[in-house]
């Protein structure tokens, strides 16, 4: 559910406006901040790879900053 919430936030937010996403999930933050680039190279062969790939794609096209807060 947490990853879907991030997808919905990224999908609905304008790419040219700064966005802050707050979550209590360390998994979400670590998956995006620390492991996304590695998982992209590995073809997203990880748990929830389909969702993480979509999140990473939304982040890569953003023109404004994204802040993930725990």
Image (tube, rainbow, N blue to C red):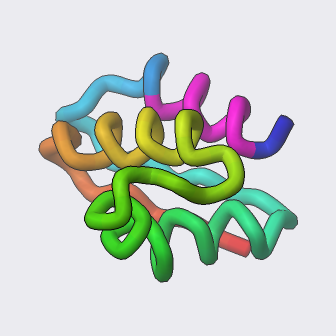
Residue 13 magenta-highlighted: no
Q: Is residue 9 left or right of residue 2?
A: left
Could you say which is closer to the camera, residue 46 or residue 56?
46
Which residue of the protein is positioned furthest toward the bottom in this rendering? 34
Residue found at x 21% / y 47%: 60
**Residue 62's x, y, as percent?**
21, 41
Which residue of the protein is positioned furthest toward the top in this rendering? 12
Residue found at x 62% / y 76%: 30
In the rendered image, the quadrant that contains the C terminus is: bottom right
**Residue 24's x, y, as percent?**
85, 65
Residue found at x 27% / y 38%: 17
Q: Is residue 30 left or right of residue 55?
A: right
Could you say which is closer to the camera, residue 29 or residue 66?
29
Up-down: is 16 above or below 38?
above
**Residue 29's x, y, as percent?**
63, 69
In the rendered image, the quadrant that contains the N terminus is: top right
Up-down: is 5 above or below 22?
above
Up-down: is 65 above or below 33?
above
Q: How many marks?
A: 0
Residue 8 magenta-highlighted: yes
Would you say the magenta stretch is mainly helix, strand or loop?
helix
Q: Is residue 47 left or right of residue 61?
A: right
**Residue 38's x, y, as percent?**
36, 74
Could you say which is closer to the camera, residue 52 or residue 2?
52
The quarter of the picture where residue 4 lies is: top right
Region rendered in magenta: 3-10
Q: Is residue 51 left or right of residue 64?
A: right
């Amino acid at each position: 559910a947490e990853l879907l919430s991030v997808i919905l936030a990224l999908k609905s937010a304008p790419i040219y406006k700064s966005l802050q996403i707050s979550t209590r999930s360390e998994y979400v933050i670590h998956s995006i901040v620390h492991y996304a680039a590695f998982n992209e190279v590995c073809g997203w062969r990880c748990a929830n790879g389909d969702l993480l790939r979509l999140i990473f794609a939304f982040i890569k096209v953003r023109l404004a900053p994204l802040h993930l807060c725990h």
